[in-house]
Image (cartoon, grey):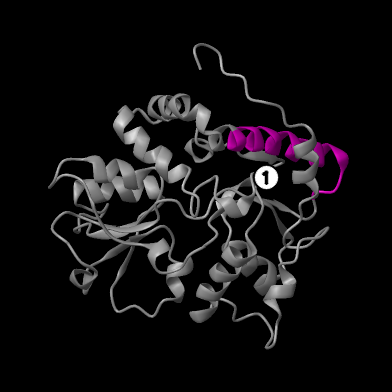
């Protein structure tokens, strides 16, 4: 039932129009490169985002000199002046599997990476010596911090494309409201367990992450309508700016003004608001 368990991607003529993606990349594309990208709504605020390691590593200090697995060489990691080498191995699922196996694709030791929902809870639930260690949680250092969001190109202007995105956002809003209602807790946990093929006890931990009031998909700052937290986004921008992530932005650029919602702005709630008008209560077949 968690929205991040499985999300559709909308495509037309091979052009990506909307998906759940990391929100802090959008200001970089928009403000550095003037890409026509807008954010339609926020999915979560980094649930269970941790620095994870193999069992033999028990502290951040132990990571010195170790290879850190990342998704892409030119992701946010590229801005960090690290002495430790990066190993580009792909998405979170791949990094999680390599961490459990203890080896990267090239056969070198897999020591650490960054994990998030649902892999963090899955790894922590494994027996000692088999699973992972969570060395640090992002929320302990920067909170709130925007993570996944629904994005589209600002060129989505004709009625057909707008209607497609509205139909995409409507069930996302419905599922989010279902998830937020505690009377659906049992059914939601069972749905998570079924979809992720995990035990009910692990699914309870996943549910706790998804409904965390600060970092989850039902974070209070999102107000139940996928609102983008202004402070969360400013925190994400600030972290990237500290490491030179906005080299293409002119001096004195006002990020606080640039993230004010409005038509064709970085944040545009037009289609989200249309989707809200179509929201209905979720009906689940069976005992739930």
Q: Can residue 167 be found in the magenta stretch?
A: yes
Q: Quadrant of residue 136?
A: bottom left
Q: Residues within 10 Å of mark 1 (few under 14, many from 20)?
A: many
Residue 14: % across, % down: 67, 43
**Front one among 269 and 31:** 269
Does any portion of residue 259 appear in the rendered image? yes
**Front one among 174 and 39:** 174
Residue 251: % across, % down: 67, 88
Position of 162 compared to 240: left or right?
Answer: right
Magenta: predominant secondary structure element? helix
Q: Residue furthest front?
A: 183
Q: Which region shows up in magenta?
A: 156-177
Residue 268: % across, % down: 76, 55
Q: Residue furthest right?
A: 159
Residue 135: % across, % down: 26, 61
Decide: is 233 above or below 96.
below
Which residue is depicted at the point 76% across and 51% down? Answer: 269
Q: Residue furthest bottom?
A: 251
Does any portion of residue 8 appear in the rendered image? no
**Front one among 10 and 264:** 264
Which residue is depicted at the point 73% across and 33% down? Answer: 167
Which residue is depicted at the point 50% across and 80% down? Answer: 242
List the residue tagged with mark 1.
225
User: Which element carries disc 1, helix, strand or loop?
Assistant: loop
Position of 62 compared to 209: left or right?
Answer: left
Q: Residue furthest top?
A: 286
Q: Quadrant of residue 189?
A: top left
Q: Can residue 255 be found in the magenta stretch?
A: no
Which residue is depicted at the point 64% across and 67% down? Answer: 27
């Amino acid at each position: 039932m968690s929205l991040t368990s499985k999300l559709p991607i909308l495509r037309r003529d091979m052009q990506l129009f909307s998906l759940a993606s990391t929100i802090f990349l959008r200001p970089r594309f928009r403000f550095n490169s003037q890409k026509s990208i807008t954010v339609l709504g926020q999915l979560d605020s980094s649930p269970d985002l941790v620095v994870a390691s193999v069992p033999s590593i028990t502290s951040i200090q132990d990571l010195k000199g170790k290879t850190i697995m990342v998704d892409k060489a030119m992701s946010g990691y590229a801005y960090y002046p690290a002495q430790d080498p990066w190993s580009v191995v792909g998405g979170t699922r791949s990094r999680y599997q390599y961490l459990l196996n203890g080896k990267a694709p090239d056969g070198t030791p897999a020591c650490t990476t960054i994990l998030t929902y649902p892999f963090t809870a899955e790894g922590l639930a494994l027996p000692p010596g088999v699973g992972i260690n969570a060395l640090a949680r992002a929320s302990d250092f920067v909170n709130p911090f925007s993570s996944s969001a629904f994005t589209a190109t600002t060129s989505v202007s004709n009625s057909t494309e707008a209607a497609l995105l509205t139909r995409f956002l409507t069930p996302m809003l419905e599922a989010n409201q279902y998830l937020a209602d505690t009377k659906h807790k049992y059914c939601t946990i069972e749905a998570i367990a079924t979809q992720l093929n995990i035990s009910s006890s692990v699914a309870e931990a996943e549910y706790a992450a998804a409904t965390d009031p600060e970092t989850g998909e039902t974070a209070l700052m999102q107000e139940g309508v996928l609102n983008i937290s202004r402070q969360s986004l400013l925190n994400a921008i600030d972290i990237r700016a500290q490491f030179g992530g906005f080299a293409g932005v002119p001096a004195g650029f006002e990020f606080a003004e640039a993230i004010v919602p409005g038509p064709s702005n970085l944040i545009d709630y037009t289609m989200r608001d249309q989707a809200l008008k179509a929201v209905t209560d979720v009906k689940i077949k069976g005992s739930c």
